[in-house]
Image (tube, rainbow, N blue to C red):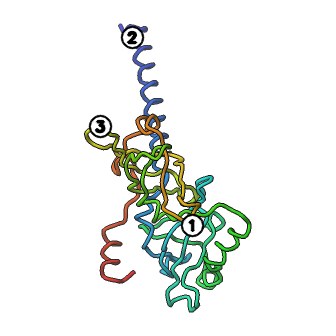
Amino acid sequence: MIDQRQLRATVLCGLLGVTAFAMQAAETERKSAGVRASVLIGNPIEDSRGWRQGILDDLLVDPADGRVAFAVVDAGSRFETPVRSLALALPDAKVSVVEGSLRVDMTLRELKRLPSLEGELESLDSAGKARLVSLKALMNASLLAAAGRDLGDVEEAVVDIERARLAYVIVDYDPSWQATGRRVALEEPEVRSTNGGGGDVVVVADDSRLRSAPEWNAAVAGLPKESLWHKMQRWLGLL
């Protein structure tokens, strides 16, 4: 005869296990929402049909709120325009990531009508808006304490491209009291530009926040990677 108390305890443990697994999966999915900036930058921008129509030269972030304001499009000769760098406003555009490329729901004709990056930045300056930060610069930034002490380096930036947000930065945290550094994911990083916005980009954080930040590695994060076929095409110059 089955012990009813033992049966109920077994069922309860099973339900708790399923709930815990679901919560962990949801947290992993939330953390994994994004793509590494280094995978995107330098790769093609594709139109709605999947045809290459330029190169993603950079992503510009508003340090005040972590919003990805613009994708910088290197037009090259395909756009037949004297302006080299065009500004694709995010999240106004409908975009997705396909095998490391940024696919935009626009035709070539619509892409050709994008405004120049220089003009957009001048408009922001004249409106007194905060200077935007280059993600290429952010991925080479120093990690500093509020007092200016060097704590390590920023290795990577992860963006949620569809929501046009800087999800987190991956930092190599190297405190003096620890023999080896830790690679941690720092959400909502405080990004600053030195010398009144015209100098180097730095990320500021305190020791306590960095010590409590989760360890990071690509396998755990589950971030999308560029396919081998895509890498081969780029190496052969076909993209």
Q: Earlier in the sequence, mark 1 or mark 3?
A: 1
Which numbered marker is on residue 7?
none
Q: Is residue 96 above or below residue 187?
A: below
In the picture of the structure, the residue carrying the numbered disc 1 is 95
Q: Secondary structure at mark 3?
A: loop
Image coords of residue 225 (percent x, y): 37, 61
In the picture of the structure, the residue carrying the numbered disc 2 is 6
In this rendered view, identify the residue nearer to me: 158 or 20.
Answer: 158
Structural crowding at the residue carrying mark 2, measured as other residues with C-alpha within 10 Å and reported as few (<14), some (14–19) or many (≥20): few
Q: Residue at x 47, y 29 (%)?
A: 19
Q: Residue at x 34, y 66 (%)?
A: 227
Q: Is residue 173 above or below residue 118?
A: above
- Mark in front: 1 vs 3: 3
Q: CA distance from mark 1 to mark 3?
A: 42 Å
Furthest toward the left, the residue is 179
Marks 1/2 in contact by CB < 8 Å: the verdict is no
Furthest toward the right, the residue is 127
In this rendered view, identify the residue nearer to me: 109 or 20.
Answer: 109
Q: CA distance from mark 3 to mark 2?
A: 48 Å
**Considering the image in quadrants, where does the C terminus appear?**
bottom left
Image coords of residue 66 (percent x, y): 58, 54
**Considering the image in quadrants, where does the N terminus appear?**
top left
Image coords of residue 8 (percent x, y): 44, 14
Q: Secondary structure at mark 2?
A: helix
- Mark in front: 3 vs 2: 3
- Horizontally, is 187 left or right of 129 in the view? left
Image coords of residue 45 (percent x, y): 50, 75
Q: Earlier in the sequence, mark 3 or mark 2?
A: 2
Structural crowding at the residue carrying mark 1, measured as other residues with C-alpha within 10 Å and reported as few (<14), some (14–19) or many (≥20): many
Q: Earlier in the sequence, mark 1 or mark 2?
A: 2
Which numbered marker is on residue 178?
3
Q: Residue at x 45, y 49 (%)?
A: 32
